[in-house]
Amino acid sequence: MPELPEVETMCRGIAEIVGRRIAGFEVPECHYRPIRIQPAAEEIHRKLSGSRVTEVRRLGKRVVIVTATHHLVFEPRMTGLVLLTDPPDETHLRGALRFERGKPERLWFWDRRGLSTLHLLTPDELERKWGSDVLGPDPLTIDPRAFEGRFVGCRRPVKVALLDQARIAGVGNLYASEALHACGLHPELLCDQLHSDQWTHLHKALVEVLLTAIRYEGSTLGDGTYRNALNQDGSYQNEHRVYARDGEKCRTCGKGTIRRIVQAQRSTFFCEACQPLSRSRKRGSGKVSRRK
DNA sequence: CATATGTCCTGAGAGC
DNA sequence: TGCTCTCAGGACATAT
């Protein structure tokens, strides 16, 4: 499932479309229900034809293709992909940006389950729909103190809060579990139970996990859905410590067993030994008093 | 306001 | 073998 590292990999993988002039937007024949495209494809075609791609950037878990006047925002959700080469199959092609003369003729939007969305927005519309009032800051650029600040007054379990895109944008189910394991925090700890030093450790672990996952070009899970822009597998799945490893021995401590629980109707994985619920396991020297 | 739940969607895998 | 059922989890609408 495309989370921050996968979407970052998508953006880097299609960065070469910067500078290309758009010849049109098209929706291929597809016997599945079409993905949500706003406004209608014909209007996107009209508004984008002739303009040049000036930038490709990531907004949380979204790919944003920028022109002088518009932002084309692709939201992959569960199974959406952007591709510059032949897709995994032809039957799930959902849209294409066609370019004037040059190497890749098209940027494909592919989605097996069809939950992904495409939005063409003006800068103002983008700010209203996905501005900082709606979407939290990026975990890769926010500093540790501001990171902690995003969770002040939150009484939910830390794993659940990490998935809240209004607090931090880009973390999904897989990397939330991996980051909590990397810093030894139990997923059921409530945010307002965590001390400042624990937030600092979590922030550090999260950034490290995300950056490493980007280096490995994301995680291609057993269903094989996620692929980079050249239809190649990521490899971070081989580095997972807890995700989908329930029942196995922990690769880190060698003692604990990986458990699976359900939080907010989503699977959470953690090591029963590395991530105790008790607060007794304080790392380092000074224990920092709780902030209000 | 914060938090909880139901919905969308297809394909894989389980169970019979 | 082939059917039916459950589950996977992104974002968001609606309910509490």
Image (cartoon, coloured by chain):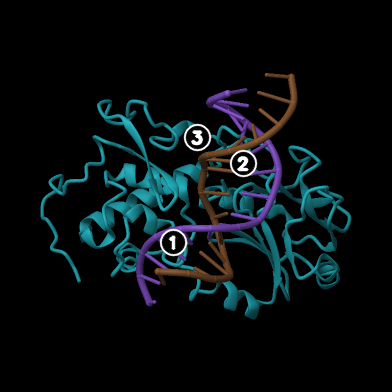
Chain colours: A cyan, B purple, C brown
State left or right for residue A54 relative to residue A5.
Answer: right
Q: Residues within 10 Å of mark 3 (few under 14, many from 20)?
A: some
Q: Which residue is found at the position 41% from the left and 53% from the top?
A: A264
In the rendered image, residue A265, in percent from the top left (x then y), is placed at: 44, 50
Residue situated in front as seen by the camera: A20 or A252: A252
Indicate the amino acid at tag 2: Tyr
Q: Quadrant of residue A47?
A: bottom right
Mark whose residue sits in front, 3 or 1: 1
- Residue A277 % position (x, y): 21, 45
Residue that label 2 marks = A226
Rendering coords of residue A273 (x, y %): 24, 34
Q: What amino acid is at disc 3?
A: Gln
Mark 3 belongs to which subunit? A
User: Could you tell me which secondary element the residue under label 3 belongs to?
Assistant: helix
Residue in view at x 48 percent, y 31 percent: A238
> Callout 1, which amino acid?
Asp
Disc 2 element: loop
Q: Position of residue A72 (x, y in %)?
A: 70, 66
The tag on residue A164 is 1
**Residue of label 3:** A237
Q: Which quadrant of the structure image shows residue A276?
A: top left
Q: Where is the N terminus of chain A found, in terms of image quarters? A: top right
Residue sitting nearer the eye, B11 or A71:
B11
Does residue A114 appear left or right of residue A260 in this picture? right
In this picture, residue A119 sits left or right of residue B15: right
Chain of residue at mark 1: A
